[in-house]
Every structure is written in structure tokens, then in C-alpha cells.
Amino acid sequence: MFKTAAIIAEYNPFHNGHSYQIEETKKRTGADFVLVIMSGDFVQRGTPAIFHKYARTRMALLGGADVVLELPVFYAGASAEYFARGAVGILDALHAVDFLSFGSERGEISLLLKAARSLSEEPEEYRQQLKKSLKKGLTFPAARKEALGYLLSSADNISSDARQLQALLDTPNNILGIEYCKALFSLRSNIHPLTIKRQGNAYHETQLHHSLTSASALRKALLAPDLDNKLQNIRPFQPVSVFSYMQDMLDCISPVTEEDFSLLLKYSLMVQNRDSLCTFADVSPELSNRIYKNLDNFRSFSQFAALLKTRDITHTRVNRSLLHILLSITEKESASRPSYVRLLGFRKHAAPLLRQIQDNSEIPLITKAADYPRLLSSKGCTLFEKDLFASDLYETVLKNKIQENFVSDLKKSPVILTSY
């Protein structure tokens, strides 16, 4: 049996910070392999990935990952809780993962575990404070943050330093880390959590001014109008092999944004009514009404999302809701238990790990997409077909943009890297 560490990622796109995490994970755990479970063609902020999943898989393998698996789209575009629950559920079902490594702004596991346990158990003190915070008009995420902060600061063995608590509860990586730990507790998993302090730019930082920059800053640079200039700006922020591959790739494909899906989204909204909109994940009656009333003002994906957001409905929540409508994803699908995992790519020396997974996993490992009807139950087939639809929609938009022929995801094969 091999010692394996897992990372849950989007790599949108891959950069030096991701490479650092892989290296640190191997160093701290002594793992033989690092397995990544990565979002496919759509990501958690409710938008398409800037590059398609096979390009990002190759970047991950060039950057040090040994195996890349796909996080199904109904988890990949979900809230932090469902995103974490789906990803951790898959990793636990593989019976091949010893460690789960994730970045956090704090870099300490103890308080993250404490917060996760508090949220999992929901003591009476926490529930009462949550009710009070909601009555004050706070959004659920803000109310939960306030209630958890109150609970942690009142605990005897936890520092009441307000700035530490704010850093814990107000930053995306910490929030995801807490959700990963919650999912591990819920599953009573034997996987050990490990957190690595985030280096360089903040998660949402959009300026390129640190060697370990953020994916947000890279996306902004990639969307700049001057290709030669943008590449020179990006070069210092990616491993050499990753940058070289991306440079070649940009000669033949183009970055994708939510704006490229605007007409498809408008059509998806036009064929729904107020009641049917509420059947999709994250769409509340309030948001459904706002969509319906403002549909005539639709100009683009991002413009419409900005128009719909309110104090109670965040921009990211709106983006996710619109994505779920576009892809016809329901709340039930986002909350479903993992029933399969798909291989996106691997380095050739990691083939023994794939054999170990195939021998021990509770859920089928799909290495050839066309085999799915033989491997999955009726429900599993329905969910996998949702993944295929999402990727084919992305492929349609991308190939229309660059004027190339469409290739169905059903016909695509995993990326295999023989060497660095």
C-alpha cells in the first residue's frame, strides 16, 4: 500500500503557489503520491474555468501532481459545504488516501478543527446566537460567522483575539478548510487533515506583485488585450514547464469567461417560470422573483449577476444560481452522495496507485468515459450524463470561439504524462 496525500483544487489556472503546496505536502507527509481532485470545466464561484479541464490537468501534472481526478460538476459549482462534502466523500470512498492537504490563511490545524467540530455538533449556545444574528438581518454566512466567532471566543481553551477569529472566519481558504474538516468528521474518515499556510497574494488579490500570486490575478492578466505583453507579465508566476505549455496552448485556444455563455444563459432563463426556477440549486423564491422581474434587462452573464445581487444574496451565490440554471443542476444533485469518480490524467509512474484505487474503491473509477453505462447504476448514469453535458456545453462555446470542430467529452481520453 502506498502513502498518498490528496489535494482538492481548481487550478484556475495553475501557479507557483499550487506547486509550493504540492511540494510542501510531499515533504510534510512523506507521501509516495499526491492525488488531486479538481473541478472540471466550471468552478465554485459559479463561472466557467478559464481553460478547459484537460489543459488544467496537464498543468497540474507538469506542476508535480501524480494523479488528477474530476470533481463532478454538481459539487464543483456548489456552496463551500457541498463542494467540500462531495470532494471529501469521493476521497474517503477511494480507500487509498492517507492525508488531505489544503491551504489556509492561518496555517494551523487546531482552530480549524475546533471550528469544524463546533459547526458539526451545533451546540445550543451556537444555535441561539445564530438565531439572534439572523434576526438582525445578517445573511446566513455572516450570521454563521458571528455565531461561530461568539462560540469560539467564549471557549476556555481558545484565544479570544478578535483579529485571529476574523482571519479564521472571513477568508475563503479558511472557510473551505473548516468545511473539509466538517466533512471528515461527518464521515468518520481515517484521512488526516493537514493545512499549509497560504503564501503570497491574498485569495482575491488581482495584482501580479508576488512570486506566489493568486489565480485571480493570473486570470485578470490572461484576459488583458495584448497577448505578448500578458505572457511576459505571467511568466514569473508559474513553474517553467507549466508556463511553456500554456504559452504554446494560447497559440491555438482562447481563455473562456462567463460572458461567453451569456446567450445560452438568456435562453435557459427564458424557458423557465418563477416556480420552475426554484427547482435549481441555490435559487430561492426571492432570487427567482428577481430573475423573473429583471429578465428584460439582461445584457450579459456578469451584468445580470451584478443586477440581481442584494445585501442578502451575494454575488457569488447569484453566479452559482445562474450556473445551476444553465446546467439544470438541482439541490438534490448537489447534496447527493458520490457514486463515481472520473480519471482526468496521471503521470505514468503513478499507474500502481490507480490499480490500488480500482482494487479498493467503494465507487467506480471511470477511466474511459464511454464505459459509464456498464459501470454505473441508473442514478449514477444520470449524474454522469450531467457532467458530460456540462463539458460538452463548455466545448461548444470554446470551439465556436476559436472556430474549430466540436469533440464530445465522451470521446476524450485521460492525459498521460511520461516525464516532466
Image (spheres, grey):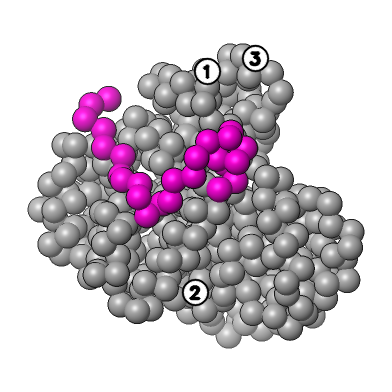
For the point 72% across and 62% down, which residue is it?
Answer: 267
Return the x and y of residue 28 as percentages of the image width and height. 28, 40
> In what element is the residue under mark 3?
helix
Return the x and y of residue 23 as percentages of the image width and height. 33, 33
Label for residue 46? none
Q: Which residues are magenta?
A: 396-420
Return the x and y of residue 187 as percentages of the image width and height. 34, 73
Question: Which residue in the structure is indicated by mark 1?
Answer: 235
Question: Whole-Å distance between the Cαs marked 2 and 3?
Answer: 43 Å
For the point 35% across and 47% down, which residue is it?
Answer: 412
Asked if the stretch drawn in magenta spans residue 399, the answer is: yes
Label 3 or label 1, whichever lies nearer to me, is 3
Quarter of the image with the C terminus in it:
top left
Q: Amino acid at mark 2?
A: Glu
Front-most of residues 194 and 337: 337
Question: Whole-Å distance between the Cαs marked 3 and 1?
Answer: 10 Å
Label for residue 333? 2
- Circle nearer the N terminus (2, 1): 1
- Relative to residue 43, is residue 119 depicted above or below? below
Front-most of residues 88 and 308: 308
- Relative to residue 219, is residue 300 depicted above or below? below
- Circle nearer the N terminus (2, 3): 3
Q: Callout 1: few (<14), some (14-19), or many (20+) C-alpha neighbours within 10 Å?
A: some
